[in-house]
Amino acid sequence: MQWNEAFRRKVMSAEEAVKVIRSGDHVWIHAGCNAPTELIQAMTARSGELEGVEVIHLMVLGEAAYAAPEHAHAFRHRAMFTGANVREAVADGRADYVPIFLSEIPLLINSGLQPVDVALIHVSPPDEHGFCSYGVGVECTKAAAERASTVIALVNRQMPRSLGDSFIHVSKLSRVVEIDRLPVELPVPGSPSEVSKAIGSHIAELIEDGATLQMGIGEIPDAVLLFLTQKRNLGIHTEMFSDGLIDLFERGVITNEAKTLHRGKIVASFLLGTKKSFDFLHNNPFVEFHPSDYVNDPTIIARNDKMVAINSAIAIDLTGQVSADSIGRRIYSGFGGQVDFVRGAARSKGGKPIIAVPSTAQKGTVSRIVDVLAEGAGVVTSRADVHYVATEFGIASLFGKSLRERAQELIAIAHPDFREELRAAARKRRFF
């Protein structure tokens, strides 16, 4: 039990633990529901003592006070994915956005191109062998913790113990802060809209029995799940999941028995959910968490036969180019795992990459299917990568289609109010 004695010597308050952070350090913060709130607050409280600290993370739930204008002298955020709590800072130039595939962030860290001096992580209590689980999120944090010279761990009695490649030994922890609270919960979403349900029903028609699924979070993925109750032997290989997946598992729809990789297992990298998801995850041998460079590796994804990847978009032009990280010049989110899974599903035997999007935005006043993307809008998924596009009006099949055929397919699933305008644009471009 020598590890236990060493662990106890590392326990201290959050305020004491973050004193090790120095001006100019690069600090990684555990993402999503793993947000180490107490450590973030204690670090931000040192704003008057610090200068030029780079704070790096994916989407973190909760407040991001270090990104506020009054702390700009002390902290500059580096967003690997731009969440709502740092969007303003990125737009104002007080924070930086890095366009990068989720699968490649661990490589960026391990190569040293993205330095990490301090990692603020949120983990479960150690087991009898001294291993803490990364709990509800492994993603890129495992790479950051292994690279950092200092690891400050929030050790939470209520953090679920996820299985798989999801552990760090207490000997690797520099400082420990003990807490006893639920991890940060994702707000419970409302019922999907009629538009989302229509999209979900179309997507469900593409999903065969025995398929393996990847889907994100939000109304459309939740709506898809509503239409899968009659499917059989579905599997899961996804960067993340939420509460909706659990209902299908408990109904016996998700069995993972037809998977051609990790048969019998839900494979993921993190979850965004509530206590319902946390309880499901805890010590559950049906679930394995692995880092993002494995889960999101397109060659790994492709080893799942009938891989169906469902991802979203902000806008799609008539040639099939997908903008998903920005609204015009304004950065909205990030690349995440969209391209990883689109390409993995495309190379899967019987795979289907799907881009799902409502036909309009801004209460029906703006078409999401457009002639050309807005000035400054970033292309996340190239037109050659896109196979299927789903709106509430149907499915467009673009793989192997010419620009003329693509325009025809996309106009057919655009909102009727915008179809003639889109046809005129296509004629002007001599597609028709």
Image (cartoon, grey):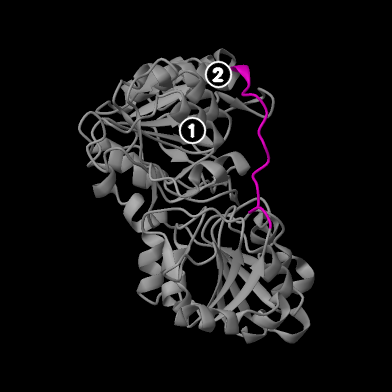
Residue at 55% x, 36% y is 243
244 horizontally vs 237: left or right: right
Q: Position of residue 119 (x, y in %)?
A: 53, 73
**Residues drawn in magenta:** 181-194
The amino acid pointed to by label 1 is: Leu
Res. 56 mark? none
Residue at 51% x, 51% y is 334
Q: Position of residue 245 (x, y in %)?
A: 49, 33
Q: Quick one: quadrant of the C terminus?
A: top left
Q: Is residue 336 above or below residue 374?
A: below
Q: Is residue 211 magenta?
A: no
- For label 2, the residue is 197
Q: Nearer the viewer, residue 386 or 285?
A: 285
226 horizontally vs 386: left or right: right
Q: Nearer the viewer, residue 215 or 409?
A: 215
User: Within 10 angstroms of label 1, few (less than 14), some, or many (20 or more) residues?
Assistant: some
Q: Nearer the viewer, residue 24 or 244?
A: 244
Residue located farthest toward the left when viewing the structure as drawn: 349
Q: Is residue 24 above or below residue 366?
A: below
Residue located farthest toward the front when viewing the structure as drawn: 1
N-terminal of the pair, mark 1 or mark 2, is: 2
The amino acid pointed to by label 2 is: Lys
306 horizontally vs 396: left or right: left
- For label 1, the residue is 245
User: Within 10 angstroms of label 2, few (less than 14), some, or many (20 or more) residues?
Assistant: many
Q: Are marks 1 and 2 in contact (CB under 8 Å)?
A: no
Residue at 28% x, 28% y is 399
Taken as a whole, is the magenta stretch helix, strand or loop? loop
